[in-house]
Amino acid sequence: MSDKFQGCTVQFTDDLRKEEAEVIIAAIRQLRGVAAVSLGKPVSLTDWAARAGVRQELTAKLWKVLSDE
């Protein structure tokens, strides 16, 4: 017997405008077995800053590997 799941989480690869996200939400609602879909919270400055910091750190590490230091 296989496991059963009551839901799943979807995360966009990039931040989307509300209008763009609503199109995707409407498509998900059309899938069989979907009871509810809703938007999460809007992106805040803190979210953006955290991602920018991670991106900068990853860039620095990659540069170090590629530059043979």
Image (spheres, helix red, strand yellow):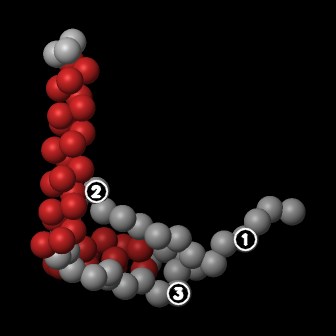
Furthest residue toward right: 1
- Residue 21 at x, y = what percent? 24, 74
Rounded to the nearest angstrom, the CA distance separating label 3 from label 2 is 24 Å
Report the Cα–Cα distance between label 1 and label 2: 27 Å
Q: Tag 2's secondary structure? A: loop
Residue 54 in percent (x, y) is at 24, 50
On the image, which quarter does residue 44 sit in? bottom left
Give the structural element (helix, strand or loop) at label 1. Answer: loop
- Image-quadrant location for residue 59: top left
What amino acid does circle 3 point to? Ala
Q: Earlier in the sequence, mark 3 or mark 1?
A: 1
Circle 3 sits in a helix, a strand or a loop, which is it? loop
Q: Please give the name of the residue rendered at 18% of the width and 71% of the height, measured from the top-left corner.
A: 46
| Quarter of the figure with the N terminus | bottom right
Residue 57 higher or lower than 26, as above or below? above
Classed neighbour count for the residue bearing mark 2: other residues with Cα under 10 Å, few (<14), some (14–19), many (≥20): few
Q: Which residue is mark 3?
A: 35
- Residue displayed at 42% across by 83% down: 37
Please state which amino acid type lies under the numbered disc 1: Lys
Tell me if residue 67 comes above or below residue 60 in the rendering: above
Instruction: Measure how far apart labels 3 and 1 are at the Cα level.
Output: 15 Å
Q: Is residue 68 visible?
A: yes
| Residue indicated by mark 2 | 13
The residue indicated by pointer 1 is 4
| Left or right of residue 59: residue 38 | right
